Image (spheres, grey):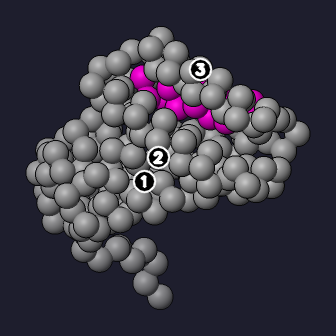
Amino acid sequence: MDTKKALPRGRPRRFDPDQAVEVAQRLFHAHGYDGVSVADVTEALGINPPSLYAAFKTKVGLYARVLDRYNNVDAIPFAELLRPDRPVAECLASVLEAAARNYAADSVASGCLVLEGSRSTDPDAREAARACQAAAEDMIRHFIAARHPDQAERLTDFVGATMAGMSAKARQGLGLSRLLATAHLASLALAQTLAD
């Protein structure tokens, strides 16, 4: 009986795919999907393109993994903030404040990766980002509708537009204090609307 262990066939993967996703997330967040090439990612990882394609198939495949990681690690924690035991306006104010803080947390990778990705020129990347955006908006809409069904659509649109605007302004260099001021003004409007 041969006691030698069988060696895996092919060349061993020279990089950690999870680390690749983390590095790619930083690049996509800082430069947008359209501003990052496969060469940019492989250079940052110190690998050749075939290794990247073997792990993720396409640049969009990598981006989809990045969006998953962002939603699980770095995105606004909607499930924690949209609580049924707190007033709706208070929860929405918490979401907007969290958005302001997230969008300004990193001067290089500012704004929201998902919202900025929803404007990509690549249709597959744009659709992947828009699906994440729609899922977040659905959470907000369902949360509002549970107590204010007649307000759910327009308030979700208002919160989404406010977040998109804050993300864009963060990308343009607007700092945390001004983003928080915007979130506060929007929160006052929400509180007034829901008090009527």
With 140 as the anchor, is 170 left or right in this view?
left
Q: Quadrant of residue 191?
A: top right
Residue 124 seen in the current view: yes
Can you say whether 178 is above or below 101 in the image? above
Q: Position of residue 71 (x, y in %)?
A: 52, 49
- Magenta segment main secondary structure: helix
Of mark 2 and mark 3, the one earlier in the sequence is 2
Residues in magenta, as a range: 89-104
Q: Position of residue 3 (x, y in %)?
A: 46, 78
Q: State if disc 2 and disc 1 touch (CB < 8 Å).
A: yes
Residue type beneath disc 3? His
Q: Which residue is mark 3?
A: 184
Q: Which residue is mark 2?
A: 70
Q: Kindly give the residue lying farthest to the right in the view shown.
A: 85
- For the residues carrying marks 1 and 3, which lies nearer the camera in this image? 3
Q: Position of residue 129 (x, y in %)?
A: 39, 57
Residue type beneath disc 1? Leu
Can you say whether 70 is above or below 106 in the image? below
- SS class of the residue under badge 1? helix
Residue 37 among those drawn in magenta: no
Label 2, label 3: how many angstroms apart (C-alpha)? 25 Å
